[in-house]
Amino acid sequence: MTELTFLGTGNFLAPPGRYWNSFVMDGAVLVEPSPTALPHLRRCGFAPGDIDVVVVSHFHADHCFGWPFLLQAFSEAAADAGGGRTVHVVGPPGIEEHLVGLCDAGAVRTVHETAVDRVDFRYMEADGAWQEAGPLRFRAVEVDHVPYLRCFGYLFERPGQVVGYSGDTTPCAGLRELAAAADVLVVECNGRHTPPGVPSSHMDEGSVAALHADYPDCHLVLTHLGEQVDLSRVPGTTVPGDFERLTV
Ligand SMILES: [Zn+2]
């Protein structure tokens, strides 16, 4: 059993009632440091000091612009605890440079400098093999999202099961690999966002329904939802709301 707490379930536009996609596994693994990850951690009853691992699928803003705020919160929690804190950060190649760059873009390089004095950050770049980031055993699977950016889905080993996460993706070999290996797959369902005939960079109701038909034993949990998604077209899936806690 794994507890998934959704800090947000919306896409880039944070449609009404849904903030940017982010969730916590078993109170200790934060998947996607979205722009509202810090306040929503608190709202869901978690403290920044509870988080041992942060996982990033790709470098789009809606997935990681919350990093500088989380970093300051991790830093203060470590200082309050008297030090000795380790936080593992998993992401695409270049993850450390990208997150430091977010602090520079936000004119808070000092937040980064103070945090690295207080917290032992261990960055781990996804390499496609089974890897261990502190308490988390995982395997990254590259998926096809946009041509200019690498994006990874993940398989997370949990007690008695494998929980997967799609990242942002189109229907592709990586997504099928995730669905074949996972007991539960948190999958994005952004919905159609390009005109007819223009390739999409996301899943929609039709591609989620097709995935469900091809992998009926994999429990699909939808996130990264756009306002345009018609949920009546994805029967048999679970659709959490923001701040909802699922036990899967
Ligand atoms: Zn994206």
Image (cartoon, rainbow, N blue to C red):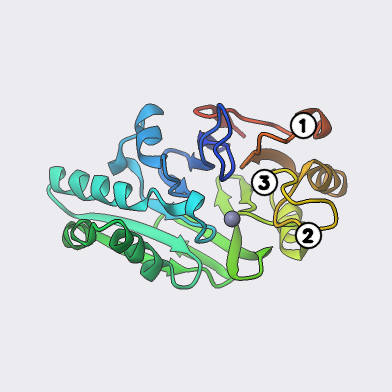
Q: Position of residue 214 (x, y in %)?
A: 86, 49
Q: Position of residue 64 (x, y in %)?
A: 44, 53
Q: Position of residue 151 (x, y in %)?
A: 59, 63
Disc 3 marks a residue whose amino acid type is: Val
**Circle number at residue 187:** 3
Tell me if I can see residue 168 in this picture.
yes
- Label 3: few (<14), some or many (≥20) within 10 Å? many
Disc 1 marks a residue whose amino acid type is: Asp
Q: Position of residue 108 (x, y in %)?
A: 23, 57
Cα–Cα gap, marks 3 and 2: 19 Å
Disc 2 marks a residue whose amino acid type is: Pro
In terms of image quarters, where does ligand 1 lie? bottom right
Cα–Cα gap, marks 2 and 1: 20 Å
- Mark whose residue sits in front, 3 or 2: 2
The residue pinned by badge 2 equals 199
| Location of residue 233 with respect to 70 vertically, above or below | above
- Mark whose residue sits in front, 3 or 1: 1
- Label 1: few (<14), some or many (≥20) within 10 Å? few
Of the image marks 3 and 2, the number of the one nearer the N terminus = 3
The residue pinned by badge 1 equals 230
Using the image as rendered, state which of residue 46 and residue 189 is in the foreground. Answer: 189
- For mark 3, give the secondary structure: strand
Of the image marks 3 and 1, the number of the one nearer the N terminus = 3
Of the image marks 2 and 1, the number of the one nearer the N terminus = 2
Tell me if I can see residue 133 in this picture.
no
Q: Residue at x 51, y 41 (%)?
A: 20
- Label 2: few (<14), some or many (≥20) within 10 Å? few
Q: Is residue 85 left or right of residue 5?
A: left
- For mark 1, give the secondary structure: loop
